[in-house]
Amino acid sequence: MIDLRSDTVTLPTEGMRAAMAAAEVGDDVYGEDPTVRRLEERAADLLGAEAALFMPSGTMANQTAIACHTRPGQEVVVEAGSHIYNVELGTMARFSGVQPRVVLGERGVFTAGQVVSAIRPDLYYLAPTGLVCLENTHNAAGGRVWPRAEARAALAAAHARGIPVHLDGARIFNASATTGIPARELAQGFDSVMFCLSKGLGCPVGSVLCGSRPLISEARRVRKAFGGGMRQAGFLAAAGLYALDHHVDRLAVDHAHARLLADGLATLPGLSVLPPETNIVLFEIETGPDAETLCARLRARGVLASPAGAGTSARGVRMVTHLDISRAGVERTVDRVREELRASGV
Ligand SMILES: *Cc1c(COP(=O)(O)O)cnc(C)c1O
């Protein structure tokens, strides 16, 4: 199977498995796992933060950040296509007692002016704004990178009004790989940043939340309350350390594969392909089967892809390149799509 559904499907490499097996561990709820501590120090350093906390998932990291930054009854400014708003089960309402205020970005990116309009004026009958969230790269917009100037402007607009800003940087290392801007610069100015180890970096489990020392000590309490206190988590942290050593530089390969895939698909009739900035390829089937049908037919031919998610048409398809996708896999995928379109009479 050529599995292009997501970069979460990667399996640990031999080297990663060896690093996990050899990990020195302890009980992290007692603060005694040396490998978790090393990962947290390494992550904080990479992101230019005072401290960091190893988390079981990106969702828990985002929601922990929201719980730390806000009080019940507040609003959180989110982009319409964002992960936090669309695919985290309304957790901000459920566990933090806050409601989203949605801003419609241009392919995931909103302006400083939109931030200003979304922040509620100080009137006693309005829900005060507690937090603004950005997503880089923007998943649903096809792995789009937030332009640095726009991100700086949005940050400044929120900060000028005393509102903290959280960065959902699930794929911040992809943003860094494609722009050449170090992750710590992309993270600069944010009040908290989360990144995923379990996506393009190839770990079986894990994300990291980075921020100030006081924020991370509060996050440790919230993580425990959410059921995310882990014991000998060093086995998982060892995979994270291995990934930061060996899998960051190779993200450029995934991006090259995504471009190759997009270029190949763009030569096929009936498809409209969004040029990828990172490792996510989105295309629309203008003529031919709908997305569900095409994905089902491709599955029968050994290629897994997903109909593009919430807020997109029934004709959008998403393919994500990663560690376990080779150049040959990309070429085979283009061939299979070509054959399926031809079989549908396109
Ligand atoms: C995957 C993802 C998350 C959440 O990560 P999980 O570990 O799956 O909970 C958050 N934000 C973005 C943008 C993501 O792509």
Image (cartoon, rainbow, N blue to C red):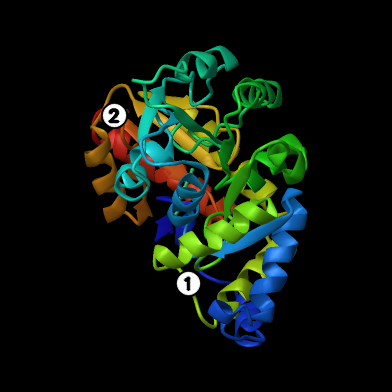
**Residue 345 versus residue 80: which sits nearer the camera?**
80
Percent position (x, y) of residue 238?
Answer: 64, 75
Percent position (x, y) of residue 179?
Answer: 73, 35
Q: Which residue appears at 55% of the width and 57% of the height? A: 218
User: Residue at label 2?
Assistant: 315
Q: Viewed as shown, does residue 111 lie left or right of 73?
A: right
User: Residue at label 1?
Assistant: 229
Q: Residues within 10 Å of mark 2 (few under 14, many from 20)?
A: many
**Residue 250 versus residue 123: which sits nearer the camera?**
123
Label 1 secondary element: loop
Whether 317 is drawn above or below 326: the answer is: above
For residue 81, which quarter of the picture?
top left
Point out the image quarter for the N terminus: bottom left
Whether 120 is drawn above or below 27: the answer is: above
Q: Residues within 10 Å of mark 1 (few under 14, many from 20)?
A: some
Q: Which residue appears at 55% of the width and 27% of the height? A: 275
Residue 338 appears in the picture as rendered: no
Tell me which amino acid carries mark 1: Gly
Residue 95 appears in the picture as rendered: yes
